Amino acid sequence: MLEIAFRNGTVYHYQNVPQQTWAQLMRAASKGRYFDRAIRERYPFQRIEGE
């Protein structure tokens, strides 16, 4: 499970994200662009808290 906290305070849990995808996210020059390309809309998620 990958937990992502956005700047607006919203927190999401993304399920079944491979360790390699997390590692690439951590190394990405732009985490937002990598997230949009490789995680958003590709993995099931649950909104945990926030706006």
Image (tube, rainbow, N blue to C red):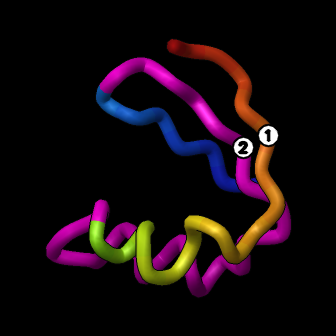
Q: Which amino acid, by three-letter code, is at mark 1?
A: Gln
Magenta span has 4?
no
Left or right, residue 44 beside residue 25: right
Highlighted magenta segment, given as a residue range: 8-32
Could you tell me which quadrant the N terminus lies in?
bottom right
Residue tagged by mark 1?
Answer: 46
Q: Image point 72% across, 32% down: which residue?
A: 47
Tag 1 and tag 2, C-beta contact below 8 Å = yes
Q: At which x and y percent is residue 31?
A: 29, 64
Residue 30, placed above or below residue 50: below
Quadrant position of residue 42: bottom right
Q: Which mark is residue 13?
A: 2
Q: Which amino acid, by three-letter code, is at mark 2?
A: His
Front position among marks 1 and 2: 1
Q: Image point 59% across, 86% down: which residue?
A: 20
Q: At which x and y percent is residue 44?
A: 82, 60
Q: Image point 42% across, 19% down: which residue?
A: 9
Q: Compare marks 1 and 2 and give the one earlier in the sequence.
A: 2
Q: Which of these two is toward me, 23 or 43?
A: 43
Label 2 element class = strand
Q: At which x and y percent is residue 3?
A: 62, 44
Q: Which mark is residue 10?
A: none
Residue 7, placed above or below residue 4: above
Left or right, residue 25 beside residue 21: left
Q: Image point 57% across, 81% down: which residue?
A: 21
